[in-house]
Image (spheres, rainbow, N blue to C red):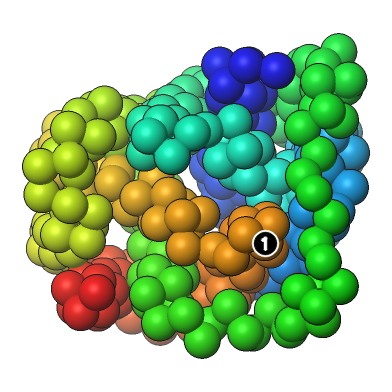
Amino acid sequence: MSIHTVLFIILLNMLAFRGSKVLVSLFALELGVPQVMLGVIIALYSLCPMLLALYIGKLADRIGVRWPMLLGCLGLSLALMLPGLLPSSYTLYLSALLIGTSHVFYNVCAQNLVGMLSTPEARIRNFANFGLVIASGGFLGPIIAGFAIDHVGHANGYLCIAVSPLIAAAIIYAHRRHLDALRGNKIKGEEAAVYAVGLLSNVPLRRTLITSGIILTAIDLFQFYMPIYGHAIGLSASAIGVVLAMFAGASFIVRTIMPRIVSHFGEEKVLAAAIFIAAATYLLFPWVENVVLLGAIAFLLGLGTGCGQPLTLSMIYARAPENRSGEALGLRMAINNVTHLAVPLFFGALGSAFGVAPVFLANSLMLTTAGMLSRRQ
């Protein structure tokens, strides 16, 4: 299987995953779900990934990536169909839980597969391309979801984006022999006996894992709370989708030039600078209601955060012990989802009490902390 085929599979899944975050926020508001309970729905995206990511990473190291990726694609499609076929607030809770569970199955393996198909010289470029695909899915997903809501409704919007994971599953099945041939070596007995927390004794790896968790939490909170903020100031679903697409478009642009920037300045300096830019940009959101200005600010934020995911992925893969890359990437996702689970619950209560503005300000504070931590590397 070529790296381009893997990236196309990731695009199909990420399109649906990112689109679902626009749909769930706006559909929940349409159904009258309180903002504090919307925080619960958002947190459910992260519950099972927090519990399962490490074990799925270990599983991928042992049996290969085909079955986890296939199950993830099929599960994601099913989870998206549920609100379309049985529209209710209760279905949104179940759908969010299943989307998060399915996403972790394919995502950990997809990240590991990109690393497996990369030589050391090509790793930065391939993970940058991985980031480009993530940004492309983040660009297309919100636009498709937003226009689907405006034209066919929330429930049918879910059914529209449920198709792309099915296409991804068909491609994985067609390349099943190639994927099985890429199965890594079994971990030696003495290595398997080492607890996963032993990975955290590697100080550079530990700092990268924590930084990654803060960055992705801040990105996810923007994707969830920008629709809420847009709804509060009277923007249409299409306009909200365009603002989110500007964020993803900027991520795409910065990732096209990221390998050259990294080769000149180094991974750690680029990562720290990008995080501080994002932290400063977050401060602007609560003071702007014009859709054009919001799109411009989202674009600047995307430039800042766009480097975070591919850089931390590459750094974690490179710093993981031999034959434990899947486990390290699973640990990364588990740490990410600990914050994904706790932070939305806190911010859901905060938003209900004080509005959305404190959520953006707290994101800025979290990113500043991540930037300081990254500088120490």
Please, is residue 84 above or below residue 349 in the view?
above
Residue holding disc 1? 324
Residue at 40% across, 82% down: 203
Residue sitting nearer the eye, 239 or 198: 198
- Specify the quadrant that holds the N terminus: top right
Q: Exactly how many numbered labels are in the figure?
A: 1
Which structural element holds mark 1?
loop
Residue sitting nearer the eye, 184 or 301: 184
Where is residue 147 drawn, in percent x and y? Answer: 50, 21
- For residue 216, say whether it is visible: no
Where is residue 57 drawn, in percent x and y? Answer: 74, 58
Residue at 89% across, 39% down: 67
Please, is residue 280 above or below residue 114 in the view?
below
Q: Is residue 102 left or right of residue 305?
A: right
Residue at 35% across, 50% down: 311
Residue sitting nearer the eye, 82 or 182: 182
Q: Please rate how many residues cluster around mark 1, counting C-alpha atoms within 10 Å: few if below 14, some from 14 to 19, many from 20.
A: many
Where is residue 333 drawn, in percent x and y? Answer: 60, 63
- For residue 136, say whether it is visible: yes
Write down the quadrant of residue 106 in the picture: top right
Residue at 53% across, 82% down: 200
Where is residue 344 drawn, in percent x and y? Answer: 52, 72
Q: Is residue 334 left or right of residue 225?
A: right
- Specify the quadrant that holds the C terminus: bottom left
Residue sitting nearer the eye, 223 or 49: 49
Give the amino acid type for the residue marked by disc 1 in the picture: Arg
